[in-house]
Image (cartoon, rainbow, N blue to C red):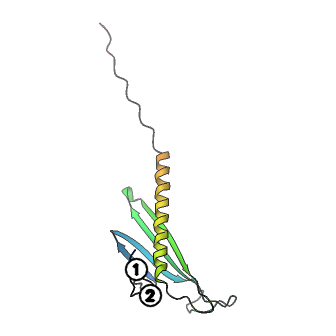
């Protein structure tokens, strides 16, 4: 995945932390969010740290019969030393790489399952014999 160096997270995200990346004919859905409990960015009262930032990615492909196979990936950017997490342009790339690997694992598993459940081939019909006169 190509990272846009002009963007803090490497992709253009909207006000809700969502992005959609189209590349090589595929669409990836990306979401950037923190695990804070409120609307304000505040330190955790127990640890004293700001919340970590999660970057999730989903890769989906639709096949025959409206079957959809998805892969999911997650990268976490931790806040350290009492300062909020700073944008990491490689976090999106790591999440997408994980989503693609998950997609491939699921594809291989489903292919194996389908091969296991494939019906056995039907036997060839026996040729008809004509009675001798």
**Residue at figure coordinates x 40%, y 74% from the top left:** 1
What number is the disc on residue 56?
none
**Mark 1: which secondary structure?**
loop
Neighbours of disc 2 within 10 Å: few (<14), some (14-19), many (20+) = some
Q: Which residue is mark 2?
A: 8
**Residue at figure coordinates x 70%, y 88% from the top left:** 46
The reply, left or right, for residue 67 in relation to residue 84 is: left
Split into 4 quadrants, where in the image is the C terminus?
top left
**Residue at figure coordinates x 50%, y 75% from the top left:** 56
How many numbered marks, from 0 up? 2
The reply, left or right, for residue 53 in relation to residue 44 is: left
Q: Residue furthest left?
A: 133
Q: Which residue is mark 1?
A: 3
Q: Give x and y (percent) for residue 45.
A: 68, 91
Q: Earlier in the sequence, mark 2 or mark 1?
A: 1
Q: Nearer the viewer, residue 106 or 94?
A: 94
Neighbours of disc 1 within 10 Å: few (<14), some (14-19), many (20+) = some
Q: Residue furthest right?
A: 46
Which of the 4 quarters of the picture holds residue 27?
Answer: bottom left
Q: Give x and y (percent) for residue 29.
A: 42, 74
**Mark 2: which secondary structure?**
loop
What is the CA distance from the residue labelled 2 to the residue labelled 1? Answer: 10 Å
Relative to 61, residue 74 above or below: below
The reply, left or right, for residue 111 in relation to residue 81 is: left
Q: Give x and y (percent) for residue 10.
A: 42, 83
**Residue at figure coordinates x 40%, y 64% from the top left:** 61
Which of the 4 quarters of the picture holds residue 14?
Answer: bottom left
């Amino acid at each position: 995945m190509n990272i846009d160096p002009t963007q803090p997270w490497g992709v253009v995200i909207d006000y809700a932390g969502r992005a959609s990346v189209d590349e090589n004919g595929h669409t990836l859905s990306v979401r950037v969010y923190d695990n804070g409990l409120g609307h304000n960015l505040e330190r955790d009262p127990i640890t004293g740290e700001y919340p970590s930032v999660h970057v999730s990615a989903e890769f989906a492909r639709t096949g025959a019969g409206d079957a959809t196979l998805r892969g999911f990936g997650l990268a976490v950017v931790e806040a350290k030393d009492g300062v909020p997490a700073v944008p990491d342009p490689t976090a999106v790339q790591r999440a997408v790489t994980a989503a693609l690997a998950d997609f491939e694992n699921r594809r291989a598993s489903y292919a194996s399952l389908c091969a296991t459940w494939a019906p056995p081939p039907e036997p060839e019909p026996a040729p008809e014999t004509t009675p001798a006169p």
